[in-house]
Each structure stands twice: as C-alpha cells, then as structure tokens.
Image: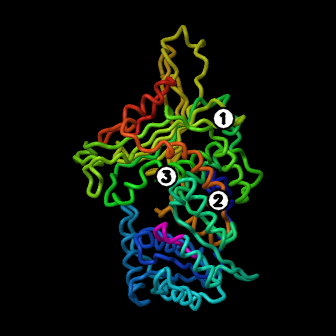
C-alpha cells in the first residue's frame, strides 16, 4: 500500500521518478477452484498482468486445484484461451497475448485433480509445493472455506517456517449475518493466525478506492475540510444495470443488503470517514477503519428502504421484473435495492448523515462517493440576480470510470454578477495512461509481498455485519418492500428518505 501512496504523490507534472518495482518472493500460487469462472476471468489475467509488469519472481508458479479430470497440458491450453479472451476484450486497448510472457508462464502452470474434502488432494498439493512459500487462494463457494482450511491445517500445509510463509486468500461472502461471520472467523483462526488470512474485497483493488487515502492525507487543502463543520452529508452509490442474471438460486437467499452493504459499501464508508492512521502499516489503517464502523449508531426502520425491480426498460431493451426472472419465487420478498441512512457517533462526523444505496436494474452502472459540502453564506449575493448558490460537491468515481470531479460556483462572463456551477474533473485513464486491469493485480501482489493494508481483518468484517444486523433481524416484510421500474433511479421511498432531510440524491443516469 505504501508503494501506491508514493506513486500517487510522485506523479505530478510531466515527469516523475520511481524506484524499480519490488518483485514478489518465489513460491506457489495455489488456486482451489482453479477451473472456475473467477479464476478464468480475473485471477489468471491478473497474474498475467503482473508478469507483464515484471513483478513476478522466476521462482513463481501456479498450481490449479479442482475436481475436473485434466492434465497439465490441457490446463495450459485452457489458461491460454482465457488470456487470449482477456486481451481481446479490452475494447480500444485490445492487444495480442504477449508471447514472451506466455512462454515464461507456460512451464510454471501445474494442475492437481482432486476433491476438496479428500486428504489425498492435499498430499498431492504438498508434493508439488514442498518447502516453498505458498499462497492458497479459495476461489470456491463459501461452504468450502472452512473445510479447505481445516484440511490445509491437518496436512501441515499452513505451517510456516523461518524461510517460508503460508497465506490464505478468502473471497467474500464472509458469512451471511453477524453470527455466521463470527463462526467463520473462529473456524479460520482455529487453524491460521490472523496475519496469515487475507480476506479479499475486489472493490479495494480499484485505483480510486486506494486513492481515497492519498487524496485525503497527502493534500493539505482536503483534510482540514473533512469534518462536520464543513461537510453537510455524504452519498455512497453502487448501482448496476444488470439484473439477477443466472444467479437466482444465490440471490434469493442473499439480496442486495447482504450482497453489497457489509463488505463493499462499508469499506467505502470506512475509508471515507476514518481518522488518519499513524502510518500506512496494515494494522494502523485497519484499526482506524474498524473504529469508524464501531461508531455507527443503530439503525431504525425509518432509516432503511428495501426495494425490488419491476418490469421496465434498460436503455432501449425491455426487461422483466425480479419476480419474473428464471428461478425466482413469483412472490419473492428479496430486495434488489437498499437505501440506508447511517450516523457516525464521533467528534469528526456527529450530525453528518451518510446515505448509501445499492441496487440492480438501475439507470446506469455507477459506483461513486459524493461529498456534499455545506453551502456558503448567501447574504453577499442578496442584491444580485443570483437566486441560489450551486452546492459544492466532490465526487470520487470508482466505476465504470475512475477519477474525481469537483463542482463549485464561478461567475458567468458578463456585466452583472451571475453564478454558474462548473466542474473540474480528473480521470485516471487520461492522466496516468494505465492499461486495463481486473482490479485484482494490486491485491494479489500485496498478498505476495505481505502487505495486508487493503485486506479485511476479522474485527473489521464483524463490525460491518454488526452495523446492518438490525435490518436482518427485522426480517422480510411485504409492507416494507418498495417497487421500482427497471432502468429507473430506484424507488420513490428512497427519494423520500433524503427529502425529509431537505436533501436529494445525485442522479444515477
């Protein structure tokens, strides 16, 4: 993480100087679920990008573990196809697979066939990785997290030596409520030390999310304003245009709240609201994030809106409602949208509401954090044609574009005093000319070098669930479910949530 901050601070003007990148230590990257969709679409391309950047040691190797009956040669063919698909789908940045990098990767790819519950599988993994540094990536369904870690422990595969580390990367979901999150953490910690566990949230692999800390703490003009004296409220939006797709079985038991808020949304809130850590050491950063989440005061029903998409239009395409999707109960009460108002009880944020919303089948795909500053005094403009002052807003764009926009007032040219809202925008793609990435490169590399700053700790996970647990305890209720047309801005009840405070959401579309 410190490398990210240094890079962000150093790139000012037309030229900059960087130290040579630090290569990963040698070792094996063992992927449980090595034949799955996550591995094919994201993990392998991320490793390829790291190889292209020269960040992988010559002693690096990939070991894919899965149930399918494959040979090393067949797996390598599958990996090449996945990488060719990745490089071809970069749009305007599409390039051919780099043959020099592929030639480097090819002999470093191995396959272990076996059942995740069988000790024979783990013995085969031990034979391939004997004495090496190892990262075990659990790219599997959540029900396998506990059993795989148990078997790794029984096989002695997570026992660290003076010259060999053993780390485990766990994908979300980290439980489905507070109780299950605590149970999962307890089970993992029965076998592993906390410093061996890397709970991954791919949102934290996005450059703009990482830049929140650089933006706040390396610029003297932001941090003095970052408090309740100057900020009116904060809006966090994570909107999608897609529906439930083919995930009805998963989504029916999950919903928008469980799927997005305790992890992705809470991480964005924590990085926006945390105090300055004493250093960019992993525990110093994670301590401050946990303090913020622990300071969230309990939710009440009036501060929560649950919604579900009905039939509508996304772009020019007619789409069905959630209850008409394949595999969905026609009377389902599962929410596909949730809006919430959080308060943080500490000296920096007391009285400043944090409004969050996330949902499917909305007007646009957009993830952003909008900081709304308090309005300037109006008295100076009473005798001018100015009828109101444009609000000052800083928007941190996370996806699909990454950057920062500032909105403020300026005088419109002419003899009279008239004000107009203007914007300044910083776009990552335009300024830094970085190639497309999966969002996993930084996270995988950080795990390799032992930097846990962007990964979640057990108490961080539990604090996120604790904040939303009251909503889960209330249960699903047809009376509290607000419907909204697919392709719209969301339910009217979400607008009313802000309207009662004399505020309004920024438009999604």
Residue nearer the viewer, 296 or 270: 296
Count every numbered label the image shows and give the total: 3
Q: Is tag 2's residue or tag 1's residue first in the polypeptide sequence?
A: 1
Instruction: Give the vertical position of 392 relative to 69 (above or below).
Output: above
Say which mark, if any, is on residue 458: 2
Residue at screen point 28% across, 58% down? 327
Q: CA distance from mark 2 to mark 1?
A: 24 Å
Identify the magenta region.
136-145
Q: Secondary structure at mark 2?
A: helix
* Quadrant the N terminus occupies: bottom right
Residue 284's x, y, as percent? Answer: 74, 55
Which one is closest to the eye, mark 2 or mark 1?
2
Q: Is tag 3's residue or tag 2's residue first in the polypeptide sequence?
A: 3
Q: CA distance from mark 3 to mark 2?
A: 37 Å
Density class for disc 2 (Cα within 10 Å; few <14, some 14-19, many ≥20) is: many
Density class for disc 1 (Cα within 10 Å; few <14, some 14-19, many ≥20) is: many
Q: Position of 245 compared to 221: left or right?
A: left
Say which mark, if any, is on residue 430: 3
Q: Secondary structure at mark 1?
A: loop
Residue at screen point 49% across, 74% down? 48
Q: CA distance from mark 1 to mark 3?
A: 34 Å
Residue 86's x, y, as percent? Answer: 40, 69
Residue 43 makes an appearance in the image: yes
Residue nearer the viewer, 370 or 463: 463
Residue assigned mark 1: 349
Say which mark, if any, is on residue 420: none
Which one is closest to the eye, mark 1 or mark 3?
1
* Quadrant the C terminus occupies: top left
For residue 139: magenta?
A: yes
């Amino acid at each position: 993480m410190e490398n990210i901050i240094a890079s962000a601070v150093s790139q000012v003007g037309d030229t900059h100087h960087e130290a040579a990148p630090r290569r990963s230590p040698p070792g094996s990257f063992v992927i449980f679920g090595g034949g799955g969709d996550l591995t094919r679409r994201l993990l392998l391309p991320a490793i390829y990008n790291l190889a292209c950047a020269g960040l992988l040691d010559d002693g690096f190797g990939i070991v894919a573990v899965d149930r399918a009956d494959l040979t090393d040669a067949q797996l390598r063919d599958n990996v090449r196809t996945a990488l060719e698909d990745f490089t071809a789908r970069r749009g305007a940045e599409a390039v051919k697979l780099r043959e020099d990098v592929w030639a480097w990767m090819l002999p470093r790819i191995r396959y272990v066939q076996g059942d995740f519950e069988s000790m024979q599988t783990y013995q085969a993994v031990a034979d391939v990785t004997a004495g090496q540094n190892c990262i075990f990536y659990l790219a599997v369904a959540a029900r396998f997290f506990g059993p795989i870690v148990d078997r790794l422990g029984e096989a002695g595969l997570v026992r660290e030596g003076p010259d060999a580390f053993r780390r485990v990367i766990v994908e979300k979901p980290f439980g489905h409520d507070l109780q299950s999150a605590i149970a999962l953490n307890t089970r993992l910690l029965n076998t592993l030390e906390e410093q061996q566990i890397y709970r991954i949230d791919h949102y934290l692999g996005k450059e703009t999310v990482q830049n929140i800390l650089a933006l706040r703490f390396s610029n003297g003009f932001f941090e003095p304003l970052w408090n309740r004296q100057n900020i009116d409220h904060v809006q966090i939006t994570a909107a999608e245009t897609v529906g439930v797709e083919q995930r009805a079985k998963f989504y029916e038991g999950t919903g928008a709240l469980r799927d997005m808020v305790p992890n992705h949304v809470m991480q964005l809130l924590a990085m926006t609201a945390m105090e300055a850590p004493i250093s960019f050491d992993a525990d110093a950063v994670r301590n401050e994030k946990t303090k913020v989440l622990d300071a969230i005061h309990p939710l009440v029903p009036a501060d929560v809106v649950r919604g579900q998409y009905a039939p509508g239009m996304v772009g020019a395409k007619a789409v069905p409602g959630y209850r008409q999707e394949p595999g969905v109960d026609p009377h389902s009460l599962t929410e596909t949208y949730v809006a919430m108002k959080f308060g943080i009880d500490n000296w920096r944020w007391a009285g400043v509401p944090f409004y969050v919303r996330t949902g499917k089948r909305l007007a646009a795909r957009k993830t952003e954090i909008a900081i709304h500053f308090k309005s300037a005094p109006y008295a100076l403009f009473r005798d001018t044609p100015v009828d109101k002052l444009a609000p000052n807003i800083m928007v941190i764009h996370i996806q699909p574009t990454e950057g920062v926009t500032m909105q403020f007032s300026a005088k419109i040219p002419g003899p009279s005093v008239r004000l107009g809202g203007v914007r300044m925008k910083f776009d990552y793609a335009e300024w830094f000319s970085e190639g497309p990435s999966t969002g996993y490169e930084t996270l995988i590399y950080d795990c390799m070098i032992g930097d846990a700053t962007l990964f979640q700790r057990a108490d961080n996970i539990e604090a996120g669930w604790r904040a939303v647990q009251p909503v889960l305890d209330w249960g699903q209720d047809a009376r509290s479910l607000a419907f909204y047309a697919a392709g719209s801005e969301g339910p009217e009840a979400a607008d009313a949530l802000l309207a009662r405070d004399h505020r309004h959401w920024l438009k999604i579309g």
